[in-house]
Amino acid sequence: AAALSSGTGLMILILLGTFKFTNRPLDNRLILGLAKLLAGFILIVLYFIFIENLTRLYAFGLREAEHYYLFEGFHSKVFWIGLILIGSIIPAAILFFPKTNKSIPWIAFASLLVVIGVLSERYVIVIPAQTYPLHQFPGKEASSVFLDGAYANYFISLAEAAQGVGIVAIIGIMFMLGLKLLELLPTEAVMHDTEKKGT
């Protein structure tokens, strides 16, 4: 479900950016239609997040790990602030509020927040599972010199951040070259009203 919201949000941003960059006409009604889809996808994502975490709280053996996931460590802040607040609640409010859901700049801002929220979700999917101590042999005690039973700490390093920015930059350059050298975009994206002719 997150792919639906992030894909729609990213599509809105790319459409607005590329058509403005190439000075091609873009009908705002297309963006408004995508914004309605994005609003629905955000609600679907919130529903699945709620069900997923409720299921883990219901299972007795997973409650300790779920508490760690939701309330302990830096990743819990990424979950509540990055995914829930910035990536879901704020953009949903923008897209459902009548004074902002028809504004293209506000829609673009909400789309950006959704993309940030999905990146936060990817972080909280991977990192807590790697930092939470595994119980490889339930009911047994196992020990070694490799920090068994201890919580690990992880923060993104400068090299990892630079690598991510570099990958995005390379993709952006390839995309701009494609726009320049190949016909990747239509000359316009305009909805034409068709008149119904009586017979």
Image (cartoon, rainbow, N blue to C red):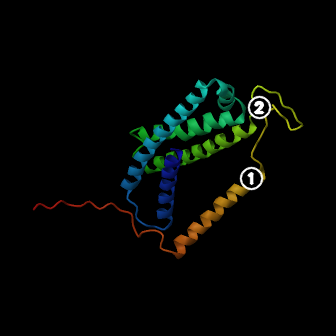
Instruction: Identify the residue at image location x=75%, y=32%.
Output: 135
Please name whichever residue, 137 or 189, is drawn nearer the observer in this view of the structure.
Answer: 137
> Percent position (x, y) of residue 32?
39, 50
Report which residue position mark 2 lands on. Answer: 137
**10 Å neighbourhood of mark 2: few (<14), some, or many (≥20)?**
few
Give the x, y percent position of residue 157.
77, 48
- Give the amino acid type for the residue marked by disc 1 in the picture: Glu
Residue appearing at x 46%, y 48% in the figure: 107
**Residue wearing tag 1:** 160
Chain-order first, disc 2 or disc 1: 2
Residue 141 horizontal/vertical position (percent): 82, 27
Amino acid marked by disc 2: Phe
Quarter of the image for residue 86 reads: top right
Q: Residues within 10 Å of mark 1 (few under 14, many from 20)?
A: few
- Seen in the image, is 71 located left or right of residue 175? right
Q: CA distance from mark 2 to mark 1?
A: 33 Å
